[in-house]
Amino acid sequence: MLTLSSLSRAQLGAQLAGDGVWLRTGRFVAHLQAPVPSVADALHLLYADYPLLDAGSFADFHLRLERPKGWRRWFRPQINLVYDGHAEFVPMPYSHAFPMFEWGLNWCVSSRANRYLMIHAAVIERDGCAAILPAPPGSGKSTLTAALVHHGWRLLSDELTLIQPEDGHVLPCPRPISLKNGSIDLMRDYLPHAAMSRPVLNTEKGTVAHLKAPTDSVRRAHQSARPAWIVFPRWQAGVAPQLTPVPRARCFIELAENAFNYDLMAARGFDTMARVIDAAQGYHFTYSRLDDALDVFASLPRPL
């Protein structure tokens, strides 16, 4: 199958400005039209390894980035994200076009893929076993995930853990890892050879950049994993690493609090969550140094 890397930067820009491109990201296909140079630049850098489908293929989501008509086209220019022909989102500054695409695609999955139990959490895999990392903004989740997937773990997702009710397995949806503010320079130094998009300033989340998903993670996006660990990470300056077991009942409650559609799925959501809790060991994890965190994750007790 062809990947996006089969297109030159000029060819990609022309297709985005025309009929668009059809990209597969894990279980989903996104059709994107975007006559925006910064989006073409970021896609060419970050999505080079992703399967490129034929024009007119089935797509789960049809997205179009377009500049509004009227005076906003020229004065403090903005960009709109149109989903299936409808402008579902508040316009953003034109320079925020690529983050808007990434956030919009997250919204598409989290609001439409309700056949899966969806948890707001990063998820990584090693030896067929998945570690689910639910955490609120500012906890260092994405920074930790970026370090782990460049040191022996496979990226399944930075934002959305998708759990299949039939067997409780986690389905991969690997995409670029979103880094914010101080994490950007930190990861530039920590992962000097990793590809990263140009930082976008003054977004609603501060300064944002995206780190390319490892090629192996993208190529293995068809391989699911069974939950083995649920780790609630929290970065705290100057602390020694501490991994504390969480009782299963408490782990169930905390994981459900991070789910997008647990209530919507009703009994099916409860049964799926219970399956995950029965299969995985839960922990609270506090850390300050990435090297310490890597050591802790390398020594996580294997599930029984």
Image: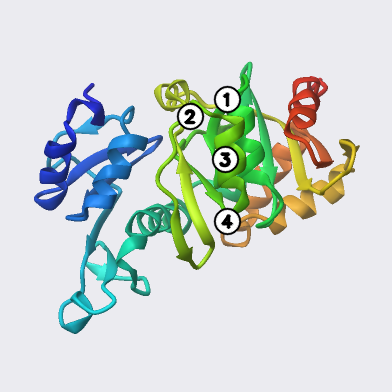
Does residue 58 appear in the picture of this structure? yes
Above/below status of 192 relative to 248: above
Q: CA distance from mark 4 to mark 3?
A: 10 Å
The disc placed on residue 150 is 1
Report x, y in % for residue 20.
16, 47
Residue kind at label 2, given as amino acid type: Ala
The disc placed on residue 194 is 2
Q: CA distance from mark 4 to mark 1?
A: 34 Å
Report x, y in % for residue 262.
62, 56
Q: CA distance from mark 1 to mark 2?
A: 9 Å
Q: Which element type, helix, strand or loop, lies under badge 4?
A: helix
The disc placed on residue 165 is 3
Residue kind at label 3, given as amino acid type: Pro
Within 10 angstroms of label 4, few (less than 14), some, or many (20 or more) residues? some
Q: Which element type, helix, strand or loop, lies under badge 3?
A: loop
Q: CA distance from mark 2 to mark 3?
A: 35 Å
Residue contact between numbered discs 2 and 4, judged by CB atoms under 8 Å:
no
Q: CA distance from mark 2 to mark 4?
A: 38 Å
Residue kind at label 4, given as amino acid type: Met
* Chain-order first, disc 2 or disc 4: 2
Residue 21 figure quarter: top left
* Chain-order first, disc 4 or disc 3: 3
Residue contact between numbered discs 4 and 3, judged by CB atoms under 8 Å:
yes
Q: Which element type, helix, strand or loop, lies under badge 1?
A: loop
Left or right: where 245 falls relative to 158: right
* Chain-order first, disc 4 or disc 1: 1
Within 10 angstroms of label 1, few (less than 14), some, or many (20 or more) residues? some
Residue at x 86%, y 48% (from the top left corner): 249
